[in-house]
Amino acid sequence: LQNSLSVTETFSASTAAPTTPQVWGNEKLAKFDILPTGTTLAAGLASTSTDPLTHNTLSAEQKLYGPLHVTTAVTDVGQTYSNKSITAGFKLHW
């Protein structure tokens, strides 16, 4: 189980630019690791202070080689406008 809290604040180099309020986010996930295959399945909920809706997400992450991982996700499953993504990246732990 994982619970994440985030704060995003945007800064501008210009003093004439309007200030953007902080955006607070909360994500709750239930993860299941299949260690022999390097696969992680997750289901969760996410919300932000700028969005009145809570979004549900299903995802699968696959370890390819070393720190290289590929993740596929579907957000708002079953809704008219679901969001689908595929991302690749490096995960380094030090």
Image: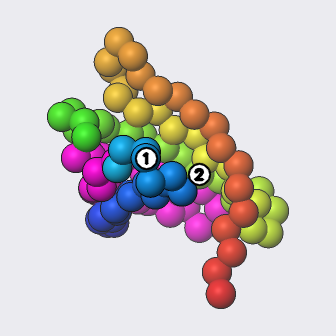
Q: Is residue 38 magenta?
A: yes
Give the distance between the C-alpha atoms of the residues marked 1 and 2, in whole angstroms.
43 Å
- Which residue corresponds to mark 1? 16
Q: Amino acid at mark 2?
A: Glu
Image-quadrant location for residue 56? top left
Instruction: From the image, give the main secondary structure of the stretch colored magenta.
Output: strand
How many numbered callouts?
2
The residue beneath circle 2 is 61
Q: Residue furthest bottom?
A: 94
Q: Is residue 22 visible?
A: yes
Q: What residue is drawn where x is 41% and y is 33%? A: 75
* Left or right: where 94 falls relative to 10: right
Task: Specify which label sits upstream in the sequence, 1 or 2.
Answer: 1
Q: Eyeballing the image, is 24 above or below 36?
A: above
Q: Is residue 67 magenta?
A: no
What's drawn in magenta, residue-wise? 20-49
**Label 1 crowding class (10 Å Cα cut-off): few <14, some 14-19, many 20+?**
few
Nearer to us: label 1 or label 2? 1
Compare residues 69 and 51 and report the one nearer the observer.
51
Residue 29, image x, y percentages = 33, 56
Instruction: Name the residue at 59% across, 67% down.
Output: 35
In x, y percent, where is residue 86? 63, 37
Q: How is the image coloured?
A: rainbow
Amino acid type shown at disc 1: Ala
Work out which residue is located at the far top of the displayed protein and give it.
80
